[in-house]
Image (cartoon, rainbow, N blue to C red):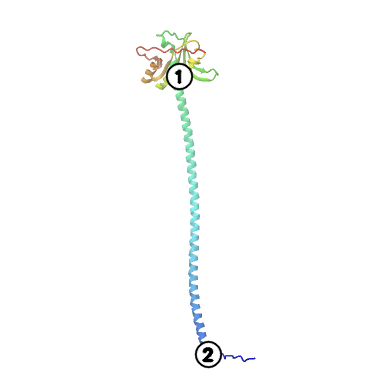
Amino acid sequence: MGKTNIKPQKGVTFEDVWAALLKTDAQLAELGECTKRTDAQLAELGKCTKRTDAQLAELGEYMKRTEAESHKRTEEINAIIAEMKKNSEEADARIAKMDKRMGDIHNSIGDLTEALIAARLWEKFDGYPYNFKRAYLNTQIFDDDNEQIGEIDILLSNTKWVMPVEVKRKLKVGDIEHHRKRMELIRKYPPAEAKGKKMLGAVAGGFVTKEARDAAFSAGFFVVELTGESAALCPPPAGFKPKEWKQSSK
């Protein structure tokens, strides 16, 4: 075997140990400073955590108050809406009641106007050769299928002539055309009281506008207007000739 050369090692001296101890002390001192700084940071973090917890708690209380106030406000708004709805319904009911009363009043006025005009209306035509003897109120018009298609307010009649009269509280131009169309229906579908008779037409009103009067005369209608508590014929213009409506033969 060959020889192995072993290098003698240098022994650890006191100086080496002392240097190591000094280095360790420095590291320990530095570690102590780090620990102090860490403790300070942890202490500051603890303070921050406490402040955050306090802020979160305050925020929670605020949210509870806000939620409670919002709920209360919502209830108040709902109560106001319910009250408004109730008031609106009551107002609608009052308006409907008033509308009904107004409708009843209008109907009553219309019925009164019709009754005043109908009273012995045939006598207003004594200056003409018609010799009306009676008046029928609210005579219905039926078609061939027995369906009601109209109504005559007043129907003056004798054995040879009939005169359907349209009555309005206030007679306007549009009512003249409406009555003209009704005369066409009567001509085509005469009620029993009018069958086989010659037909004339008239319009009447509690108040008659000048335009309506002129339009009525142009259409060949007589015009009747209330004067106080009775009706009177409006004087026709010169050359007025009442229109005769001939019934259709079917």
Q: Nearer the viewer, residue 133 or 65?
A: 133
Question: For mark 1, what is the residue?
Answer: 181
Q: Nearer the viewer, residue 27 or 234?
A: 27
Residue 74 in the image: above or below residue 58:
above
Question: For mark 2, what is the residue?
Answer: 14
The quadrant holding residue 219 is top left
Mark closer to the chain start, 1 or 2: 2
* Residue type highlighted by circle 2: Phe
* Residue type highlighted by circle 1: Lys
Q: Nearer the viewer, residue 149 or 102?
A: 149
Q: Which mark is residue 8?
A: none
| Residue 64 in picture, x, y percent from top left | 50, 55
| Residue 165 in picture, x, y percent from top left | 44, 16
* C-alpha span from label 1 to label 2: 140 Å
Secondary-structure class at tag 1:
helix
Residue 198 in the image: above or below residue 181:
above
